[in-house]
Amino acid sequence: MKLDIYNHVFPVKYFERMQDVIPNKGPIKRWLNIPMLYDIDARLRIMETFGEYQQILSNSMPPLEYIGGPDQTPELARLANDGMHALCRKWPDRFPSFIASLPMNNMPATMKEIDRACNELNAVGIQIFSHVNGKPLDEPEFYPLFERMTQLDKPIWLHPARAATFSDYPTEKKSKYEIWWTFGWPYETSAAMARIVFSKMFDTLPNLKIITHHLGAMVPYFEMRVGPGWDQLGTRTEDEDYGALLASMKKRPVDYFKMFYADTAVFGSASATRCGLDFFGTERAMFASDCPFDPEGGPMYIRETIKILNDLDITAKQREDLYINNARKLLKL
């Protein structure tokens, strides 16, 4: 059995409503050319080719707060979460549960939707993005979300978000060559992780559970910058007392980064998989494919990720932990 904890789908009613209100229609052309994203029959047919294979469903990009204003996003969240719940009830053998979407530009509605989705619809956790329309996640207004998820003892899936409007250089108005995605998204995840670490959120909420997309993004590859590099926090900065911040932290920065969880969605890279598992260990990583955003429209990332995990030089128990045991434990399935 293989449990894919991070893949994306659009419930039909949500997808229809999203197309009505989204300001940027550009991505819709691409989405309509990926049937597995919105056509459940197409998704099931591909899933069947992988045998005992299940998916934890999550909404696709863009974040709800990008689609509509604070008066629109609560409705979008309800449509998305109700749609996910219905899919899980209809096909429980394929979709054991889902990750809830939230209207993050409306925090009172977000807190209500957390309780509704997690308590009434049995969502296994929530999905948030690396920023909320430009606001970092360690802003005080978002702290109640992290506190509530800790109380519920359910994980948070952290997905990167950046658009072409985030330029690569100050002299330009937009990013070229989709650099905003290829390199920008891993940076977004890593920066959000760092803000959470240095806000000391793990000190105040030691049982906080955050699953980072793409195997912790840049962090494993830059382990020694995160480690000995950030052990010298403050030596490069004159206008902030980062030395005092470092002294007030209960652990080394790198040890906080190891408190995150990670998924194996690295687009089928064996080297990136080994690097990520070296950093997080097999006990804090879980199988995920990022389906259906591969050149084949769904099966490629599933197939290649399975091949890599099957070929890893690890024990049978560690492989089983990656495929299903870690997720079952963390998600209480």
Image (cartoon, helix red, strand yellow):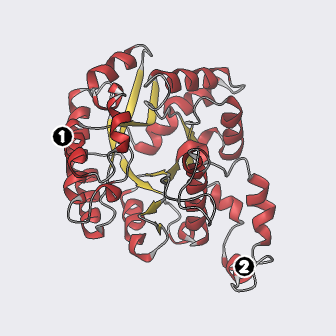
Amino acid under disc 2: Ala
Q: Residue at x 25, y 66 (%)?
A: 70
* For residue 190, side relative to residue 244 (left or right): left
The answer to whether residue 81 shows anywhere in this view is no
Q: Give 124 or 32, whichever is nearer the viewer.
A: 32
Q: Residue at x 47, y 66 (%)?
A: 137
* Position above or below: 271 against 308: below
Q: Residue at x 47, y 38 (%)?
A: 327
Q: Give 74 or 296, whichever is nearer the viewer.
A: 296
* For residue 111, side relative to residue 287 (left or right): left
Q: Quadrant of the C terminus?
A: top left
Q: Position of residue 39 (x, y in %)?
A: 27, 26
Separation of marks 2 and 1 at Cα, in angstroms: 51 Å
In terms of sequence position, does the residue under pointer 2 or pointer 1 come before the other?
A: 1
Element type at marker 2?
A: helix
* Position above or below: 105 against 120: below
The answer to whether residue 174 shows anywhere in this view is yes
Residue highlighted by disc 1 = 13
Q: What is the count of numbered marks?
A: 2
Q: Position of residue 59 (x, y in %)?
A: 34, 43
* Position above or below: 25 against 112: above
Q: Which mark is residue 313?
A: none
* Mark 1 Cα shell of 10 Å, populated few (<14), some (14-19), many (≥20): few
Q: Residue at x 21, y 36 (%)?
A: 12
Amino acid under disc 1: Lys
* For residue 79, side relative to residue 255 (left or right): left
Residue highlighted by disc 2 = 247
* For residue 129, side relative to residue 59 (left or right): right
